[in-house]
Amino acid sequence: MNPLAPKIDNPLATAATHPLVAATKEQLAVTAKQPLVEYVRRSMEVEEPEEVERRANELTVIGYEKTANHLRERAEMLRARRRHRQQSIYPSPIPEASDSQWARFVRLMEVGDVAAVTPSGQVGIFQTRLKRLQDLGLARDVRRVKTESGQRWTATFRQPLTLARLLSDPLLQYRIFVASMRRYRSEILAEHRKAFGTQIEGKPATLSGLLAVAHHAGPALASWMASAEDRKRFAKTTTAYGRTTGVF
């Protein structure tokens, strides 16, 4: 509980028993010398800009505007550091997207766990289809195999790639995702450029949205675009389109 602005559960509490009074007394007992200074010091150690901003707003409410502004400067510095880190990790590999747009697209496409293999044969953070790995020349003989717990998807991977290595390496998964998006981009621009700007599911189609559909639907992209029934039947793909179209 924040000692400067604790949650008030009982609005009818008396002054002596009011949670704000009790919390303030407890804080003063713990840090008898300059409790505000101690609170600010601890706040400056927080690494999440949203939390630092929240604390700054609390200080404004109780009248410490200058101190609050100091924390806001810290929050903005943390945000700038985060943006730089994201852009460093996700430089755009395609000319249609800026680094920041590409970083946003990547975050929206990160929907799985690094070590996951879904019942439908999708793997990793981006839930890349094993069939897509085969398209990219990284695997062959995609198939289901029996295990003690049932059945699971696997493939024969091109050495030195293995399924175990793929499921343990998020950077490798990202590099494969980039290679896949580059290839899908070329196909979309060659075959579906006229679809840009048309309304699909109530939103204008853009390259980012169609890349998301291609990622999930593969060769069924054209069918998904043309058929409202397909868009209803493949709800996961349609949801991905709705999240990502318009990013670039």
Image (tube, helix red, strand yellow):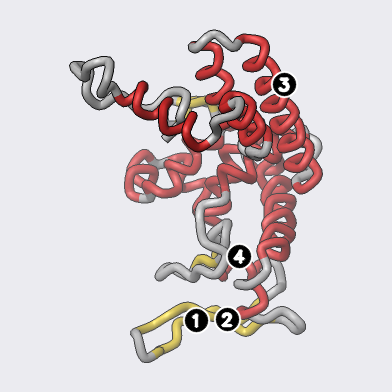
Q: Amino acid at mark 3?
A: Glu
Q: Which mark is residue 156?
A: none
Q: Dot 3: within a 10 Å radius of its alpha carbon, few (fewer than 14), some, or many (20 or more) residues?
A: some
**Is residue 214 depicted above or below 62 in this figure?**
below
| Label 3 secondary element | helix
Q: Are marks 1 and 2 in contact (CB under 8 Å)?
A: yes
Circle 3 residue: 73
Label 1 or label 3, whichever lies nearer to me, is 3
| Label 2 secondary element | strand
Closer-to-camera residue (54/245): 54
Instruction: Quarter of the image for the N terminus: give it.
Output: top left
**Is residue 134 depicted above or below 197 in this figure?**
below
Q: Which mark is residue 143?
A: 1
Looking at the image, which residue is at 72% across and 21% down?
73
Q: Are marks 2 and 4 in contact (CB under 8 Å)?
A: no
Closer-to-camera residue (165/240): 165
Looking at the image, which residue is at 69% across and 40% down?
103
Circle 2 residue: 155
Residue 232 position, x and y percent, is 33, 43
**Badge 1 or badge 3: first in the primary sequence:** 3
Circle 4 residue: 132
